[in-house]
Structures are given as structure tokens and as C-alpha cells.
Amino acid sequence: MPPENWQSAPPSYPNNNPPTSPPPQIPSPPYNAVSGLGPSAQPELASQYIKPRRRWIVPMLAGAGVVVVAAAAVLIVQAYRNNPATIFNQALSNSLATKQIQESVSSDVLNTILVLDTNNPKGPRVSTLTTKSLGANTYVKGYGSLQNTYISYASDPTNSTTTPTNLLDQWIQVRSGGSLPAGVTLNPLFTASDPRYQVVGSWMFGGFSGKDRSGLLKLAKSSKLYQIDALKIAQTNIDDHAALVYSLSVNGDKLAAYEVQAGVLFGIAKSDVATITQGLSGTTIGLKVYIQKDIRQVVRVDTTVRGLTTRVTYSGFNTAKLAAEPKANLSYSEYLKQLGS
């Protein structure tokens, strides 16, 4: 056929009958070797990939936020715990929960080492060793409860003594059945071994119940007994332990009210508490309170009243051991007779 007369021939069908069904469709592209899926699955694959990734981001951001908040909370707690006012209040509370304590007392009146036991707050007991009284060297042991008190002019292992030999190493009962014999004065040697005069003071230790301790803390706070001045807090070391030193001015009348409430909790008669606190009215007491930071305990208190300073150092918190109650060798009247013979 000549080229100029060429044209496409019409399709031929068997028996000249064209098919009634649609023509065959072009097949979809072959399997995607990269994705492993055909093209119709690609949008679904994308959604399955992107959505989980977004779900991972949200928890990660939330977790980071929790870590930041937790770290900030730790810093806040640490700042609170290291705040000088917090340390002071914790030490005050700890003192009122301390059942046994050893005290070393040094003043112009007495040098005494004593062990105080308030495991039963209403039955405080004390044992003492006094090495100086009113400026004179001495060596006197003591023991006392609210019912009975004793002293003994003991043999001094390092120095000679002027104590009459008939009184040496004899336990003399001063207070008996809660009462003092007629004519007994408040001799410093007698009061040193009497818990009435040892448990009540400008800073107190005692194994009080939670309720009683809370009452004392509430009174101290409401009366503003111990007013902390941030400019009067110093840092020091005591026996290689970091300590804070608080310089305080305490109102004598407020302290008296605090001591009266504590005295009742110690089981001390109101008349005795009145005698103990009578010198506080109208005074200002200077205190230097040393608190060991790691244990939140008071380890030293310097008390100045009317120009006289008493230093007390504390140790043996809840571990100090009290001596056993002695057996009396002499009554107070017998002691006076021996002293005059």
C-alpha cells in the first residue's frame, strides 16, 4: 500500500461483534522495593511513622519537665533545711525530746559534770560530780530525784582534801520523801544534785511526749521567747563539726512563763518553780546557743544573767548513763552532828 494512502485499520472483532465489557485497565505500578508496599499504602505508612514519633516527643518533654520540677523541689527543701531559723527550731524540738544528756557546767559558782535522765519526765533524776564550789576546789558526788537527794564528800584521786575523815565517802541524804529538813539552805552543792534546779533553765532538755513538747514549742513561738537576728548568727566548728552560734536576748518574764510550764510537766511543785524563777522578773538574759548542724542538737549554751556567765556543754544525747541511786549512810541531822564533832 502506498504510504500516502496509509491509515490505521479499524480493529477487527470476531464475527464483527465488538465486546460489551470495558477495556482492560493498565495495571498499577509494581511492588515498591523500598517501602515494601504498593503506592496506595504510602500515605498510611507515613501516618503510622509520623504519629508514633509525635507520641514519643510528648512524654519526653513531660519527663524533662518532671525532672526540672523535682530538681527545683530538692533545692527548695535543701534551702529550707539549711535555713538558720529552721535549724534552730529543729534543735529546740530535739532538745525537748532528748531523754538522757550529759552536761558540763562551768561558772563562778560551780564546776559540775552531771548526767540528767528524763526518760520519765515527771520523775527526772540526776547524778553529779562537783569539782569546784564558790571558787574553792572540792570533790563532791551527788545524786537526786524529786523525792530524795544525796551528796558525798568523795576521795579526790588527784588532790588532798580538808573534809573530815569521818565524813569522807559517806552518802548524806539531804532531801527525803520530797521534803528538805528544817534549816537547810539552798547551798550550791545541794541544788547541784537536785533535779528541780537542773531540769528547768534557759535551755531545757526532756523526754516529753509529743503533746507536751508541742505545747512548749507553741508557747515559745507565740511568746517570741527566742528571737533570732540573722545578723547575730555566726559559724564555727566544735570538735571538727560545723556549728551555728545564735546570739539571743531573752526576756526574763517570758522565760519564767516557759519554765513554769515546763516545771509542771516535770512534776515540780509550783512553790519550787516559783523559787527557781523568782530572779528572772524584769531581767534580760543573754544567750549564746551553739547548734551542731549535722545532728541538729544544741551542744553548748552560754547564759549571762546580771553580769554572771554560766557555760554548759552537752554530749551523750540519749546515750548518757545515770549512776544508780546510792544508799544513805547519814541523815542530814547526823551529818550536822558529825560536822560539829
Image (spheres, rainbow, N blue to C red):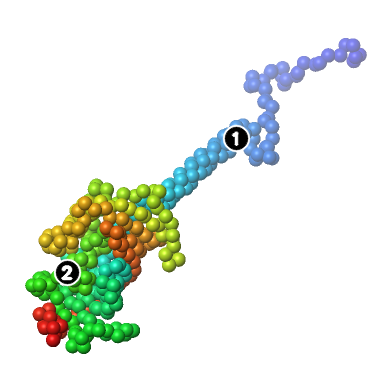
Q: Nearer the viewer, mark 1 or mark 2?
A: 2
* Pick the front one: 278 or 67: 278
Q: Earlier in the sequence, mark 1 or mark 2?
A: 1
The residue at which mark 1 appears reads as 46
Give the left or right position of residue 103, taking residue 5 as reference.
left
Label 1 neighbour load within 10 Å: few <14, some 14-19, many 20+: few
From the top left corner, tell me how far across and down residue 6 is, in percent: 86, 14
From the top left corner, tell me how far across and down residue 67 is, in percent: 48, 46
Which quadrant of the structure image shows residue 296?
bottom left
Q: Residue at x 35, y 54 (%)?
A: 247
Q: Is residue 193 visible?
A: no
SS for callout 2: loop
Q: Is residue 104 above or below residue 30?
A: below
Query: As shown in the figure, which amino acid type bears the numbered disc 2?
Result: Leu
The residue at which mark 2 appears reads as 186
Which quadrant of the structure image shows residue 311?
bottom left
SS for callout 1: helix
Give the left or right position of residue 74, taking residue 252 as reference.
right
Point out the image quarter for the C terminus. Answer: bottom left
